[in-house]
Amino acid sequence: MKRTTLFFSFLVVVSCAACKPSPQPSPHANTARLTITLSPLGNGGNGPFGFGMVGLAPNPQSGAADCILAEGHEGPVVCVEEYPVGTMVALVVTPTRSIIETLNGCNKTACEGCGPGVSTCQVVMNRDQAVSVVFYRMR
């Protein structure tokens, strides 16, 4: 009797172990996040503050192709977008009545055919990446 009970107990344990679902990969395992921070800066830390935008190509998965720091905004703007791992993202940084004080976190590239003050750079989305831009506006 003990052997029969032991056998059936073993059978139940084995069958329950086979029913457990295996761990599933994270739905974001094949994507990487690009965090873009746009900060305004004014002469002496006071207004008027700089502003501008960053255009993204290709479009991120959200479909939003631009990260915009609007005129009159006195604090930073943060845009977070997701791309498939391995994607090369081109950024076009366009100041509006401002200059680009700093541009960090991406490889600067030649900006052929761009307007005055516009900068371009690239980042490869092999992991989460962060790019920061400070727009400066003199009085």
Image: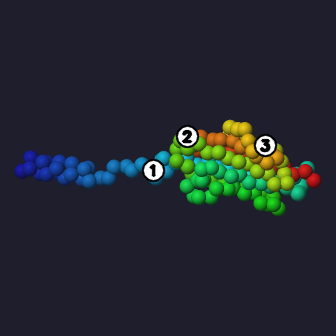
Local secondary structure at mark 2: loop
Q: Give the answer, above or below, for where 119 lies relative to 50.
A: above
Q: Nearer the viewer, mark 1 or mark 3?
A: 3
Where residue 63 appears, x then y in whole percent? 59, 58
Q: CA distance from mark 1 to mark 3?
A: 35 Å
Query: Considering the numbered disc 1 on the image, is that residue within a helix, a strand or a loop?
Result: loop
Can I make out residue 95 in this image? yes
What is the C-alpha distance between the residues marked 3 and 2?
23 Å
- How far across and how far down the image is residue 101, in percent? 82, 44
Name the residue nearer the viewer: 25 or 19: 25
Comes first in the chain, label 1 or label 2? 1
Q: Please give the name of the residue rendered at 72% of the width and 57% of the height, measured from the top-left corner.
A: 68
- The mark lying in front, picked from 1 and 2, is 2
**Percent coordinates x, y for residue 20 in the rendering:** 30, 53
Which three-letter amino acid code belongs to the residue tagged 3?
Thr
User: Mark 2 packing: few (<14 Cα in 10 Å), some, or many (20+)?
Assistant: some
**Around disc 1, counting alpha carbons within 10 Å, would you say few (fewer than 14), some (14 to 19), or many (20 or more)?**
few
Left or right of residue 130, residue 71 in this image: right
Which residue is label 2 attached to?
Answer: 126
Residue 63 horizontal side relative to residue 134, left or right: left
Question: What's the residue type where badge 1 is placed?
Answer: Ser
Q: Please tell me the numbered disc located at residue 58.
A: none
C-beta proximity under 8 Å, tags 1 and 2: no
List the residue tagged with mark 1. 26
Which residue appears at 63% of the width and 53% of the height? 80
Give the residue furthest to the right.
139
